[in-house]
Amino acid sequence: MAEAAESPGNAGTASPRPLFAGLSDISISQDIPVEGEITIPVRSQIREFDSSTLNESVQNTIMRDLKAVGKKFMHVLYPRKSNTLLRDWDLWGPLILCVTLALMLQRGSADSEKDGGPQFAEVFVIVWFGAVTITLNSKLLGGNISFFQSLCVLGYCILPLTVAMLICRLVLLAEPGPVNFMVRLFVVIVMFAWSIVASTAFLADSQPPNRKALAVYPVFLFYFVISWMILTFTPQ
Amino acid sequence: MAAVDDLQFEEFGDAATSLAANPDATTISIEDSHEPPKQPGPPRGSGREEDDELLGNDDSDKTELLAGQKKSSPFWTFEYYQTFFDVDTYQVFDRIKGSLLPIPGKNFVRLYIRSNPDLYGPFWICATLVFAIAISGNLSNFLIHLGQKTYHYVPEFRKVSIAATIIYAYAWLVPLALWGFLMWRNSKVMNIVSYSFLEIVCVYGYSLFIYIPTAILWIIPQKAVRWILVTIALGISGSVLAMTFWPAVREDSRRIALATVVTIVLLHMLLSVGCLAYFFDAPEMDHLPAPTATPNQTAVAAKSS
């Protein structure tokens, strides 16, 4: 870059020329070295970083990933317009949340013959295939978000609903009754609204402006179905 | 094209003026999936209906030309499938509105779809309907059996997959059969109007929209209310379907034309009545004699019937 800037400067000091006249004199092979200077300085750091992560303790590795996941949880809980979820996407958080939710929602094996709540596999399939369908839908409508970024956002925004599930399990330990149900209904509605707000804060900008509602509606349906499963959970 | 200029939608002004200046030119070559395929899309306005009427009558050959040019990507690329989602929010709303208010003499396909069939509407309307039926059925059963001591609430999650199978099979297999039948008749009798497979899927998908509020209202546990709702919903969506497909079979022999339209409406009725019967328990259970000290068998037998 420095070399390229010098030649118009040299040409300019040699004789008065119009602006950018010297640019036509630049040929790629001579004036701009494509090795060495152009590489991003960070990359050399990453190279030595890579070799050092191989030698670090397991605790360091796990804590680093957990911290990244935890940071994204904070971004979901306090949704601001930020790119962290999109830039450094990962699927660990969605996996942890999905497994937790499915473990808590599954019915016991005792009443598998009656109609009951969803099994573990059914919740898992609904969450992941729902997220994949919504991502495909937003890409087909012309959104410019990548596949895994969208999966990451949708997965992380299940966090409020997982919190609602935990609260509902605790509330269900008390005696059943209409008050019990009202508390659970209120908690689920609040968390559902939180999930929608969080996910649209991240996803809405990537859609073309005249199709935003078309892309957001499936997200609404997805979280509504999960909220319904949480609300109708009855322990055996 | 003076009416088009009056609408002042300057974003698509170039397309409108170029189309007006050179009617044989197409506007596809500029961009791929972010521009409506033919006409400029004005926002919701009262002037649009008559504009559509004007444009709908004299550009039928243009629509064929443009429809042929639209799907140019091979079917294994992503862009091919993007052409089926080339709708804006207001277009989806207009199509839904058109399915709710069937106007005699106006064809849903000619008026709203106009060679831009989309898969967004059919897919998400069916998905919403699946969950609406499953959730409403569950809720209505809960409300009907509320207070009965022998009733233990279960979420009945299995019914979601059954509902999904029924609705998606109806929304895809019946249009396939109908399209095959119309193609077969077309080879025997020259029909002026013929529909592509996607247009038929589109009509069926949008005609199912009326069942979403119907399913939610079916929670009310009164038999009379439910049957009135069935009649209203069937009337509206059946008439949309009948008015769409009547022009396609009109030139055929009278018996076959009538049989086709009657079969379409009959299948539609079968769907709605079947869903009502399977997912929603009959409310007469409420009026059974109060469970005495007899063993649980009576209540369980009544519940499982």
Image: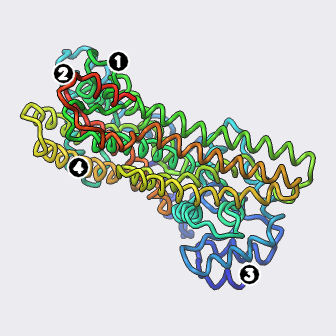
Circle 2: is it few (<14), some (14-19), or many (20+) Cα within 10 Å?
few
In the drawing, does residue B27 fall left or right of residue A155?
right
Q: Are marks 1 and 2 in contact (CB under 8 Å)?
A: no
Task: Find the distance from the CA under tag 1 to the CA under tag 3.
Answer: 66 Å
Q: Mark 3 — residue? A: B1
Q: Position of residue A65 (x, y in %)?
A: 24, 27
Q: Mark 4 — residue? A: A189
Local secondary structure at mark 2: helix
Task: Find the distance from the CA under tag 3 to the CA under tag 4.
Answer: 51 Å
Give the farthest residue toward the left.
Answer: A174
- The answer, for residue B204, to whether it is visible in the render is yes
- Residue A113, label in figure: 1
Q: Position of residue B179 (x, y in %)?
A: 76, 44
Circle 3: is it few (<14), some (14-19), or many (20+) Cα within 10 Å?
few
Q: Amino acid at mark 3?
A: Met
The chain to which mark 2 is attached is A
Relative to A120, residue A128 above or below: below
